[in-house]
Image (cartoon, rainbow, N blue to C red):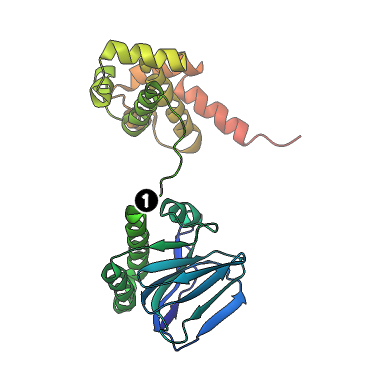
Amino acid sequence: MIEYLPRSKQHTELYLTQFGIEECIAGHEFGPAVRTHYLLHYVFEGKGIFEVNGIRHCIEPGQSFLICPHVVTYYQADPIHPWSYGWIGFHGTLAESLLAQAGLTLASPVLHYEDKNRINQCLHEMMQSAENSKARETRLMGLLYLMLSMLIENSRHTLPVPVTSQAEVYVEQVKDFIEMNFSQKITVEDIAHWVGLNRSYLCSLFTKFTAISIQDYLIQYRMDTAATMLSSTDHTVGNIARSVGYSDPLLFSKIFKKIKGSSPREYRSASLLHTHMPFE
């Protein structure tokens, strides 16, 4: 059984193109040929061969083999013990990265995954998803991510991690916290508590690596966000002030003028004038 799917217009990062399950006849083969998407087979029973880049892989139960886009491959079921397998075809900007996390690449296209029941269950749930057409695409996306996450969890392969000092990690954590919570009434003390360091030590560390204090970074981030909102939306100054963490619009306007050199209303007017300025 095979089902082909239309290309997703909602999900460019990862989307299914087809899936299926098949009990192959002895000697069943495909190729040499190329595909335009990723195709991942998982062998439940039987065996066969898979050839890519001049290398022949003998595939047995519990193994997956990956076909990459635009690469010539060939595979054939064993003439005595032909395989039965399930497969998923997919593509998207995240596909290569997720496969690499599972240890699957063009140079290493085969992996072993012991729990065939979980793979089988996911494929059958994909088939049954046709019963719920309203949410089917979302359901299929979830199952695709689930299958890839199972392979990633199973993998002994680890991607190289950039060498980063612990101090740099703390600095990034501060930035992440501010970017996620700048609209709230957060303090440097809140940030230090979340990172798990003494306030004075964290402030010293952050300033050393960024040449700006945590408080100034927070204010700058808020004012940059407010500036973007002023030039791209028609929200009131009061609404923008509250959106970036200031309950008092007058205090917000005072700080904005200090940082940006003009009041919020003047900044908006200048932005609109610049946007509508004719080309010379």
User: Along the horizontal axis of the image, is 112 left or right of 32?
Assistant: left
Callout count: 1
Residue 191, placed above or below residue 89: above
Residue at horizontal 45%, vertical 59%?
14
Q: Residue at x 46, y 26 (%)?
A: 224
Please state which of residues 75 and 259 is positioned toward the viewer in this rendering. Answer: 75
Q: Is residue 20 above or below residue 55?
A: below
Which quarter of the rendering shows the C terminus? Answer: top right
Which structural element holds mark 1?
loop
Which image quadrant for residue 188? Answer: top left
Q: Nearer the viewer, residue 269 or 203?
A: 203
Image quadrant occupied by the N terminus: bottom left
- Quadrant of res 128: bottom left
- Can residue 74 be spotted in the picture? yes
How crowded pointer 1 is (Cα within 10 Å; few <14, some 14-19, many 20+) is rated as few
Residue drawn 29% across and 10% down?
A: 200
Mark 1 — residue? Answer: 156
Q: Is residue 109 left or right of residue 201?
A: right
Relative to residue 242, is residue 139 depicted above or below?
below
Nearest the viewer among 22 and 250 is 22
Residue positioned most to the bottom = 25
Q: Amino acid at mark 1?
A: Arg
> On the picture, is 133 further left or further right than 229?
left
Q: Looking at the image, can residue 262 be seen?
A: no
Residue 154 x/y as whole percent: 33, 56
Q: Quadrant of residue 74?
A: bottom right
Residue sitting at x 33%, y 77%: 127
Along the viewing direction, whichever of 14 and 104 lies nearer the viewer:
104
Q: Is residue 190 left or right of residue 249?
A: left
Position in image of residue 251 (x %, y %): 34, 17
Provide residue 68's location: percent of width, then percent of height.
54, 64
Residue 138 locus on image (x, y percent): 35, 64
